Image: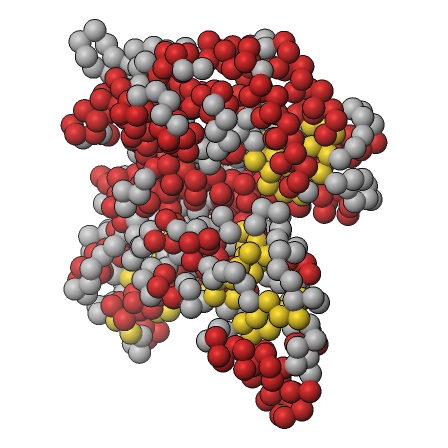
């Protein structure tokens, strides 16, 4: 079960609706008589996953209370005390969000009972449907459970029983979700933030003056309580290529099993690849795999007769594979999901290059649980894509706290964005076929542009994508098919949490979709005219990375653009001239020039660094994509002052780290992430480091113009 985060969409929450029945309404003295709860799994009420327990209050039950809920002294005589029941209750809700009606009352009574029982009280993350109903419809006459349920058409069964009221809370919550979405409240963090604003304003609301607990955790309290257990960043620091065994051991398909067993034993390997001719360097689709477990299974089934088989007859196909540039956490989660011990490793062209096994990953499994999994790759629809994407901000926050290089963290974010784009393209293509539009009319490739292509995406990124296809004219049948497919893809990404691009740099825009021939003419036009719009298009295009489909088409297009740009000196001079020195981020007194307490450090620093690195890389033939690699390439070629460039690289990493941490925190708090950092959240040392970084990069544009 994944931990809930502020970025989790409300419609996909794993939660528990909870209610209590008590001896009275005074939270200081009321004792709990019954706890009822019902789970919500992925936005669906789990009717069979319930918790319903009576509690011995240790004192007589007032007749007035019995008249309301029907629980009398005889009914609780054999019940267990609160401490025992509460331990079971906590096990039932685990790390889930807790939802209830007027939950502040229940929380206050539960806390006092825990104290009486000598138990440590940890307030769960909660939402109150009374407050949510107020947010969804401020015009209701009142916010009683009866009025809310009548408005939403939810039937309440067994009113004033803990389980009955918990079920009502669960169903009301799910009915509220679409109405909250209409008011711009989509995630848990947004719901918490909005609830806190009105908690003390609701008539008779959940206020501390009434003895009730605050119904929603504030951001600071949620930060203190957020825990993911032991966390080891190793799997986020290493790629599959660092861990895999290479070259792969490949045998001919006609090798007999006994010879294969002797080879595996002699070389102490747990698997071999099988190819018709026993040749390396081919597409993974041409290979099968035979593992020691396959051999043992065959011997168990057939005894000595197993050795009459060839490896080609026994090898398993198709191979389950992973890219060699993928991070180790992706390999671990894929093995866990598929319950396998070996993954074939492929290069960007889809050729077999090695193997990674569970033994290779044993050092990771011995330490930390991996927080990002393979959920994006297996998402069945945009809702599942959104749920998978929502886990990213909390992991990024942890990695920042672990002091990983921010550029590496941005690569991880970019890897997830590319995976999400790839999955959206796959689902869009499937949907086109399911709707009777047929399969793709020709080979095509989906491209990620801009920061996603460079490996520098942050959590506030919007979409930058394009499509190149093998043949077809603008508005022709091929283009028409890909236009419809791109529309689906971009809206799936938007639904999943990657907003539509404000500048319309998306494959749904005809200007960012076309055949290879169309794209080449388009690039020639951009390079020839060099208008401000052309320069913007060219800038992000030199960062493109193929992510889905016929990757060769994408690589061919990049090579064409790169070769044209490198030899067209007027273009690089125009690109360099278009980089402005950042405006001063400081006031006349040396403070930060903030807006609403925040400083846009992308505008004041990162943008110029990225643009300068791009144009200098193009000018000097450095084909790397990332800003870091481009700057390192300049140092290797002794272009510019090495000390100044290394200083700029350090500043780039610092700025990325501050933005990532702020964005992770904002998403969990229900705020829209941006490129602006809250200066007041920085300690004195961080403020000084930020000032130093911004001063060091003040002349980066001049550096670019001076070394074209």
Residue plotted at (37% across, 31% down):
636
Height in image: 575 above or below 498? above
Left or right, 236 with reference to 518? left
Height in image: 231 above or below 633? below
Residue plotted at (68% across, 37% down):
553
Residue plotted at (21% across, 6% down):
588
Left or right, 297 with reference to 336? right
Residue 67: % across, % down: 37, 61
Residue closer to the observer: 661 or 118: 661
Residue 571: % across, % down: 55, 13
The N terminus, quarter of image: bottom left
Height in image: 502 above or below 357? above
Query: Dividing the picture into quarters, in which one does residue 448 lie?
Result: top right
Residue plotted at (59% across, 79% down):
260
Query: Dividing the picture into quarters, in which one does residue 695 lie?
Result: top left
Left or right, 213 with reference to 162? left
Height in image: 670 above or below 505? below
The C terminus, quarter of image: top left
* Residue farthest bottom in this picture: 304
Residue 174: % across, % down: 52, 47
Residue closer to the observer: 559 or 151: 559
For the question of whether residue 45 can be seen, the reply is no
Q: How many marks?
A: 0
Query: Dividing the picture into quarters, in which one does residue 346 lie?
Result: bottom right
Residue 225: % across, % down: 27, 49
Residue closer to the observer: 480 or 573: 573
């Amino acid at each position: 079960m994944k931990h809930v985060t502020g970025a989790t969409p409300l419609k996909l929450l794993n939660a528990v609706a909870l209610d209590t029945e008590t001896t009275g309404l005074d939270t200081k003295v009321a004792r709990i008589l019954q706890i009822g709860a019902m789970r919500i799994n992925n936005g669906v009420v789990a009717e069979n996953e319930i918790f319903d327990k009576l509690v011995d209050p240790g004192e007589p039950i007032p007749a007035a209370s019995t008249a309301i809920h029907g629980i009398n002294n005889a009914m609780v005589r054999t019940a267990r005390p609160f401490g025992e029941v509460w331990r079971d209750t906590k096990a039932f809700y685990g790390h889930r969000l807790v939802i209830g009606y007027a939950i502040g009352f229940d929380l206050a009574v539960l806390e006092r009972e825990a104290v009486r029982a000598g138990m440590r009280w940890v307030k769960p993350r909660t939402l109150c449907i009374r407050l949510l109903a107020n947010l969804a419809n401020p015009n209701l006459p009142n916010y009683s459970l009866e009025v809310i349920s009548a408005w939403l058409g939810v039937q309440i069964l067994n009113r004033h029983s803990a389980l009955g009221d918990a079920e009502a809370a669960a169903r009301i919550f799910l009915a509220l979700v679409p109405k909250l979405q209409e008011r711009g409240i989509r995630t848990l963090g947004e719901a918490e933030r909005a609830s806190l604003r009105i908690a003390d304003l609701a008539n008779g609301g959940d206020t501390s003056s009434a003895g009730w607990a605050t119904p929603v955790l504030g951001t600071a309290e949620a930060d203190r309580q957020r825990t993911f257990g032991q966390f080891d960043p190793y799997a986020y620091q290493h790629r599959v290529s660092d861990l895999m065994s290479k070259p792969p051991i490949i045998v001919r398909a006609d090798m007999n099993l006994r010879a294969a067993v002797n080879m595996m034993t002699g070389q102490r390997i747990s698997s071999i690849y099988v190819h018709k001719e026993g040749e390396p360097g081919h597409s993974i689709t041409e290979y099968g795999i035979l593992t020691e477990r396959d051999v043992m299974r065959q011997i168990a089934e057939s005894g000595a007769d197993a050795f009459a088989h060839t490896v080609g007859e026994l090898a398993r196909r198709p191979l389950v594979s992973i890219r060699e540039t993928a991070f180790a956490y992706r390999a671990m989660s894929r093995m866990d999901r598929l319950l396998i011990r070996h993954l074939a490793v492929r290069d960007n062209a889809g050729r077999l290059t090695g193997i990674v096994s569970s033994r290779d990953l044993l050092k990771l499994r011995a330490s930390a649980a991996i927080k990002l999994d393979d959920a994006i790759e297996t998402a069945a629809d945009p809702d599942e894509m959104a749920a998978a994407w929502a886990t990213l901000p909390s992991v990024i926050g942890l990695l920042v706290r672990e002091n990983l290089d921010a550029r590496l963290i941005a690569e991880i974010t970019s890897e997830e964005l590319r995976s999400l784009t790839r999955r959206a393209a796959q689902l869009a293509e499937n949907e086109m076929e399911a709707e009777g539009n047929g399969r793709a009319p020709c080979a095509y490739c989906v491209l990620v542009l801009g920061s996603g292509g460079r490996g520098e995406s942050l959590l506030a990124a919007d979409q930058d994508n394009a499509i190149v296809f093998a043949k077809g004219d603008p508005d022709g049948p091929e283009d028409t098919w890909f236009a419809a497919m791109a529309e689906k893809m971009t809206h799936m990404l938007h639904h999943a949490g990657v907003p539509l691009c404000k500048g319309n740099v998306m494959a749904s825009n005809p200007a960012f979709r076309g055949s290879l021939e169309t794209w080449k003419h388009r690039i020639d036009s951009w390079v020839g005219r060099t208008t401000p719009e052309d320069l913007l298009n060219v800038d992000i295009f030199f960062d493109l990375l193929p992510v889905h489909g016929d990757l060769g088409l994408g690589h061919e297009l990049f090579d064409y653009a790169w070769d044209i740009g490198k030899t067209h000196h007027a273009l690089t001079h125009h690109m360099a001239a278009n980089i402005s020195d950042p405006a001063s981020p400081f006031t006349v007194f040396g403070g930060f020039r903030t807006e609403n307490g925040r400083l846009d450090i992308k505008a004041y620093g990162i943008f110029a660094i990225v643009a300068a690195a791009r144009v200098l890389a193009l000018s000097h033939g450095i084909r790397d994509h990332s800003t870091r690699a481009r700057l390192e390439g300049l140092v290797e070629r002794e272009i510019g002052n090495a000390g100044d460039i290394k200083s700029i690289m350090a500043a780039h990493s610092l700025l990325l780290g501050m933005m990532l941490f702020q964005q992770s925190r904002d998403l969990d708090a229900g705020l829209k992430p941006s490129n602006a950092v809250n200066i007041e959240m920085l300690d004195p040392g961080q403020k000084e480091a930020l000032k130093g970084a911004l001063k060091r990069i003040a002349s980066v544009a001049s550096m670019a113009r001076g070394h074209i």
